[in-house]
């Protein structure tokens, strides 16, 4: 059985439950979407509203128009800026996915620029989709090899499936590599454009115009909430972020 066959089995089983695919239009979510569609299963498409570039948005909405599919954006209830001694910067968004508001932290690298990250319209159309908080299974394209400086040398996900008690995170591509995903997209003749090849990062958190290093919250007019700022001491900042999101000590 090929990896693609195994993926089809996994996707078929996963989407028989109350599941949603977090969709960015990148290669991983693109493959999961097309595999699910080929199996004839219902696919609820959601995305974390932590911003994306104009190019990536254009690519995704063209795809959705062709597929006659709707994408629903889900805004965070909290955000914080974080950095480390290497001057890497990231933005952590906290999304309530549990019935009592339990949050899932999502991390994006910061991209310096003038664009606001919260540039996607927020829509909750209850007659067409169940609100994200009620989905039991959240499907993401995270892999074993995925890393981020906040986690250090630890994988973003410790296994291919995480039961949080109030929700399940499912990672069907956990044992895949980036090259394998791209190869299968080509085999299936699924158009894939990589925004970073044109110096466009796709998903971005370009909030630096508002989130200057400093102390205290700043109000975001698009998110309609205060965004947390931590005093810009990179080492302490990183330690604080790891504690907040529960990263194991290394």
Image (cartoon, rainbow, N blue to C red):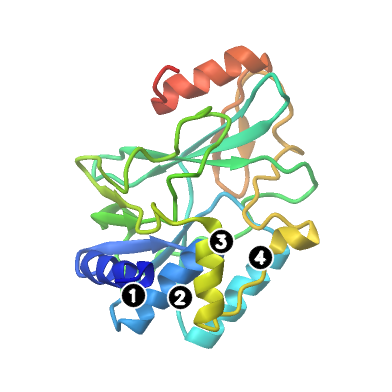
Which numbered disc, 3 or 4, marks the residue closer to the eye?
Answer: 3
Q: What residue is pinned by disc 4?
A: 56
Between 124 and 91, which is closer to the camera in this rendering? 91
Which numbered disc, 3 or 2, marks the residue closer to the eye?
Answer: 3
Q: What residue is pinned by disc 2?
A: 70
Looking at this view, name the residue that lies furthest to the front.
Answer: 1
CB of mark 3 within 8 Å of CB of mark 2? no
Q: What residue is pinned by disc 1?
A: 128
Label located before the other in sequence (1 or 3): 1
In space, the residues marked 2 and 1 are separated at their CA atoms by 9 Å
> For numbered disc 1, what is the local secondary structure?
loop
Which numbered disc, 4 or 2, marks the residue closer to the eye?
Answer: 4
Mark 2 neighbour class, 10 Å CA radius: few under 14, some 14 to 19, many 20 or more: some
CB of mark 2 within 8 Å of CB of mark 1? yes
Label located before the other in sequence (4 or 2): 4
In space, the residues marked 4 and 2 are separated at their CA atoms by 16 Å
Q: Is 11 displayed left or right of 91 in the figure?
A: left
Q: Position of residue 71 (x, y in %)?
A: 47, 70
Q: Position of residue 211 (x, y in %)?
A: 69, 33
Which numbered disc, 4 or 1, marks the residue closer to the eye?
Answer: 4
């Amino acid at each position: 059985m090929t990896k693609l066959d195994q993926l089809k089995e996994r996707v078929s089983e996963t989407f028989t439950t109350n599941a949603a695919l977090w969709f960015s239009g990148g290669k991983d979510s693109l493959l999961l979407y097309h595999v699910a569609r080929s199996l004839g299963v219902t696919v609820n498409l959601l995305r974390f509203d932590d911003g994306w570039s104009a190019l990536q948005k254009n690519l995704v909405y063209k795809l959705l128009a062709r597929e006659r599919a709707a994408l629903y954006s889900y805004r965070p209830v909290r955000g914080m800026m974080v950095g480390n001694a290497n001057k890497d910067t990231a933005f952590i968004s906290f999304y309530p996915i549990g019935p009592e508001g339990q949050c899932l932290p999502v991390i994006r690298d910061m991209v310096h620029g003038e664009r606001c990250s919260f540039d996607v319209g927020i829509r909750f159309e209850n007659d067409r989709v169940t609100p994200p908080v009620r989905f039991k299974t959240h499907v993401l394209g995270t892999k074993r090899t995925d890393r981020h400086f906040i986690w250090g040398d630890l994988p973003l996900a410790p296994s291919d499936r995480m039961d949080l008690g109030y929700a399940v995170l499912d990672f069907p591509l956990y044992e895949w590599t980036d090259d394998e995903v791209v190869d299968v997209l080509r085999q299936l003749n699924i158009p894939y454009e990589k925004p970073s090849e044109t110096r466009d990062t796709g998903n971005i958190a370009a909030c630096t115009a508002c989130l200057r290093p400093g102390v205290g919250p700043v109000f975001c007019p698009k998110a309609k909430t205060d965004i947390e700022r931590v005093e810009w001491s990179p080492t302490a900042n990183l330690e604080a972020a790891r504690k907040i999101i529960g990263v194991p000590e290394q």
